[in-house]
Amino acid sequence: ISFKDIKANTYEKVEASLSDLIQDLYKSYKYLLQSPKLDKIDKDDFQKYITGPLSYPLILKSFKFLSELLYKHFGKKVIVLIDEYDTPLNNWYAKKLAEDGTLKSASEDAFFEEILSLFREMFSKVLKDNEYLEKGVITGILRVAKANLFSGLNNLGEDSVLDKKYAPFFGFTDAEVDGLLEETGLNQTPELAQDMKSWYNGYNIGGLTIYNPWSIMNCLSNRGELKAYWVGTASTALIENALILDKFQEEMQRLTEGESLPMIADPKMVFADIKSSPNALYNLLLFSCKWYMQLYK
């Protein structure tokens, strides 16, 4: 399940979008309605998720209930994959900055707490003490410090761009890029191979040089045409609105002149700090490469 399209500035719209997402998810498992291993009660409850509308309690237990039915049907525990869990909060913060340039208001706290309660309970039900769960994996940009979305979860492990364990999987390694160049025949032009690496090598993760897969694959499919393929593939509103502030402009000028700026890398993020702390913005830039968390049952 991916929350990448759950983008709204009111709780009601977030819940409605989440409800639609869950209904589509259940429709992809409609074959369970024909399963001889599910009883009538299970199938009647499953049907509620397809026909809707979904009540708040149905939304909260949706992922755990689906894992239970899959376990009954296949006789195997379920792996739950959740992508971009933090998009609803990231998107709201970006919109708020764009609209009035502030993150401090009563409406912020009300929205924040309602969204946190919804996602916290939903995650807790499916990932904590779920006897049908084999393993859960959650990905996002940052672990939002104020959020406590994962409070109470046991056997929790985290891996970010600062860690070595999964470093090779954040993108293409040198060896993989060389292999792709050889497979496509583009390695016959050494200058092109060097230019590609110069264009698309933007990451150092866990001590490894990592290349942007989207850019590399697009460049290869266009027979080595060097372009900024990554542009426009994701929202940068939150970063753009922070960068226009004078304090960041001054530090960006120092960086472009070849100076270095010290920062403390901290994967726990408080979005409100972006307006007052350069370190918060740099952490957002660092971990936007992709924050990765793995939950072990």
Image (tube, rainbow, N blue to C red):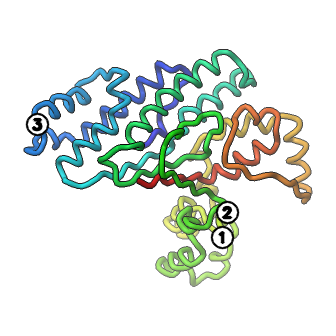
Instruction: Say which amino acid is labelled 1.
Output: Thr
Q: Earlier in the sequence, mark 2 or mark 1?
A: 2
Residue depicted at x 79% and y 32%: 275
Which x, y percent locates residue 103? 71, 25
Between the C-alphas of marks 2 and 1, the distance is 6 Å
- For residue 177, side relative to residue 271 (left or right): left
State the residue at coordinates (28%, 53%).
77
Answer whether labels 2 and 1 touch (C-beta < 8 Å): yes
Q: Which residue matches tag 1?
A: 209
Residue 30: quadrant of the picture: top left
- Nearer to me, 137 or 184: 137
Which residue is more in the foreground, 39 or 105?
39
Give the percent coordinates (x, y) of residue 198: 70, 69
Q: CA distance from mark 3 to mark 2?
A: 51 Å
Residue denoted by label 3: 39
Rounded to the nearest angstrom, the CA distance separating label 3 from label 1 is 52 Å
Amino acid type shown at disc 3 = Asp
Query: Badge 2, how many Cα within 10 Å: few under 14, some, many 20+?
Result: some
- SS state under label 2: strand
Name the residue rendered at 65%, 71% in the picture: 208
Horizontally, is 170 left or right of 16 in the view?
right
Query: With 270 as the anchor, is 116 left or right in this view?
Result: left
According to the picture, the residue beneath numbered tag 2 turns out to be 203
Q: Residue 99 or 136: which is nearer the viewer? A: 136
Q: Can you tell which of label 3 and label 2 is closer to the viewer?
A: 3
In primary-sequence order, the first of circles 3 and 1 is 3
Residue 179: % across, % down? 51, 79
